[in-house]
Image (tube, rainbow, N blue to C red):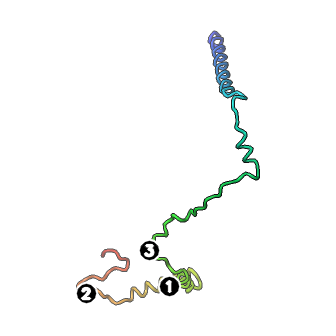
Amino acid sequence: MLKFSIERPRRSIALAALLLSASAIVWAQAVGTVQQDRQPTWQASQAATTVPPVGYQSVFSDLPKGVESTALDWKAANANVGQFKRGHADLVKWEQEQAEKARKKPDTAPKGMPAPSPSGGQP
């Protein structure tokens, strides 16, 4: 019981100190101590106030043109893609035909040398 009676005043003192410090922060800048210059605010509110022109600079002007050294003709690229009328199915078929042609190619390696693998890896 004695412990309870001693701690209660300590809590009250701590609470009072906390409230006083909080109120000091609130009143740190009292009303009327700040003087606002009304002229810029008034000028900004008027429709006749002149505004300086905005300088335009494209955000794309400093960008690199790309990793390729030459520009590709988009019409030719579009025509190449257009040869596959059924889309991805035709593209897969074309890739398979190219692989078959590569397999049927005669061996051009000199005698005694192994033929290069189609994957480009070491034998």
N-term mark: 3 or 1: 3
For badge 3, the amino acid type reads Ser
Read off the residue under disc 1.
Answer: 94
Q: Foreground mark, 3 or 2?
A: 3
Q: Distance between the residues labelled 3 and 1?
A: 28 Å
N-term mark: 2 or 1: 1
Count residues near mark 1 (Cα–Cα under 10 Å), then give few for <14, some for 14-19, many for 20+.
Answer: few
* Residue at (59% x, 85% y) in the render: 85
29 or 120: nearer the eye?
29
For badge 2, the amino acid type reads Pro
Count residues near mark 3 (Cα–Cα under 10 Å), then give few for <14, some for 14-19, many for 20+.
Answer: few
Q: Position of residue 42 (x, y in %)?
A: 74, 44
* Residue at (76% x, 52% y) in the render: 47
Do callouts 3 and 2 mark residues in contact (Cβ within 8 Å)?
A: no
Query: How many numbered badges does the structure rendering display?
Result: 3
* Circle 2: element type: loop
Read off the residue under disc 3.
Answer: 69
* Residue at (63% x, 9% y) in the render: 2
For badge 1, the amino acid type reads Trp
Q: Where is residue 80 in the image (x, y as percent from the top left)?
A: 53, 84
Q: Where is residue 100 in the image (x, y as percent from the top left)?
A: 43, 86
Do callouts 3 and 1 mark residues in contact (Cβ within 8 Å)?
A: no
N-term mark: 3 or 2: 3
Q: Foreground mark, 3 or 1?
A: 3
Quadrant of the snapshot with the N terminus = top right
* Circle 1: element type: helix
Quadrant of the snapshot with the C terminus = bottom left
With respect to residue 36, does 54 lie above or below? below
Read off the residue under disc 2.
Answer: 110
